Amino acid sequence: MTEGDPTMSTATSLPAMPHGITPEWLTGILHAAGVPEDAHVISIRHSRVGDGVGMMSELSRLNLTWSRPGPELHTTLIAKYSSSNPINRQAANGFHVYEREVRFYEEVLDRTTARTPCCHFARLEGDNHLLLLEDLGDYRIGSQAVGATLADARLAIDELARLHAPFWGHVDDLTWVPHIASSYHAETMRTMAIAGWDNMVNVFARHFTDTVIRSRDRILAAIPAAQARMDSAPVTFTHGDFRMDNLLFGTRPDQFPIITLDWQGPLLSRGVVDVALLLGQNTLVEVRREHERRLLQAYVDGLSALGVDYPIALAWEHYLDALAYQWCYAATVTGSLDSSNPRSKAWMSQLIARQVAATEDHQLLQRLDTFG
């Protein structure tokens, strides 16, 4: 779902965000992206969107007034840019997330049938980045705080199969994408999980069981071995942050059923890492409990339709390993990022509650003992 190539080669410096995008600057960028030369942006109205939902970036909707009408002229765009929150921005720099998202649009998107917003501009300067994206505000945005229904989860599972299949066992050329183990990503995740664990438990204490609290050292000590297992064959290109707030759902017959946002954290890992994040931390607990195996079978069937052989028995064992590993993600996100915004705290609370439930349901703490 692209529209030409993002204008990576422009020499124009990035403006100050969020209000530094001027009509003159934007006109030049859009001309380079293929907008007719006789059309000019004459005014821009900015409004923030998604406050408290994102972690590493911020979003603004740009409402555009043009010098002439035309069906080919975008009346709105979404600007995505680096976080102004110093805690989240420091975390973003540690994970190189801005570089990873820009390079995804430049180098990876055309190799997958996974659907994303059209990207008209993508640029990185130091720790500043800017994407100008298609405005899909008439889609329903997923909510991790609310949780995925069975219908949402099934659409998302099908999309993961489309994302993972083209790269299954074919990732050697993606040298800039970090592996989930033995990489800067892996080390930063482990460091932040250890540093964030106690804060996570303090802030979200009501969602924890005594068993999980007592297993702190056991869980954290297992992270390197768990990462190594997630980096064992079969390895593919994964989203890395496949949660409900990064998904859009179509509401009309003419729309795509699902679109994936936020490509800041792609990883090379087993594909079930994405599946485990979706089902373990984003799907309603009662839905996961009743339909978990059928949803994993749908993932296996989707891969099979695209030429990938992944036996369900093996996929199930890999999936349980990935659920256990997601404690590393949970501690990193909820313990190290800013949870003071009420919307942030709401989805982080549900993340923890669902991860605890999956841990108890599948006896994941005992599974950690097999990671050595």
Image (spheres, helix red, strand yellow):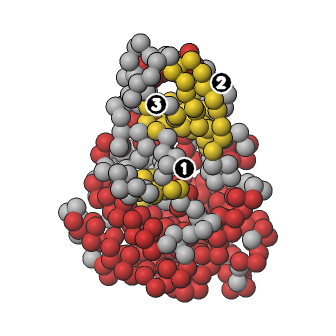
Please tell me whether residue 129 is drawn above or below residue 57 in the rendered image.
Answer: above
Residue hosting label 3: 74
Write down the residue under mark 1.
184
Badge 3: few (under 14), some or many (20 or more) residues near its Cα, within 10 Å?
A: some
Q: Percent x, y for residue 194?
A: 68, 64
Looking at the image, the residue that sits furthest to the top is 38
- Nearest to viewer (mark 3 / mark 1): 3
10 Å crowding of disc 2: few (<14), some (14-19), many (20+): few
Pointer 3 or 1: first along the chain = 3
Label 1, label 2: how many angstroms apart (C-alpha)? 32 Å
Query: Are the residues tagged 1 and 2 within 8 Å (C-beta)?
Result: no
Closest to the observer, 362 or 37: 37
Q: Residue type at mark 3?
A: His
Image coordinates for residue 224, horizontal then vertical, percent: 54, 66
- Residue 20 got which mark? 2
Q: Find out whether the residues at labels 3 and 1 contact each other: C-beta distance under 8 Å.
A: no
Residue type at numbered disc 1: Tyr
- How many other residues sit within 10 Å of disc 1, few (<14), some (14-19) or many (≥20)? some
Q: Is residue 15 left or right of residue 251?
A: right
Q: Position of residue 131 (x, y in %)?
A: 52, 35
Q: Secondary structure at mark 3?
A: loop
Residue at the image point whose x is 43% and y is 80% from the top = 292
Residue 39 versus residue 346: which sits nearer the camera?
A: 39
* Above or below for 209 versus 118: below
Of badges 1 and 2, the one in the foreground is: 2
Residue 163 lies in quadrant: bottom left
Type of residue at label 2? Answer: Gly
* Residue at x-position 70% and y-position 58%: 343
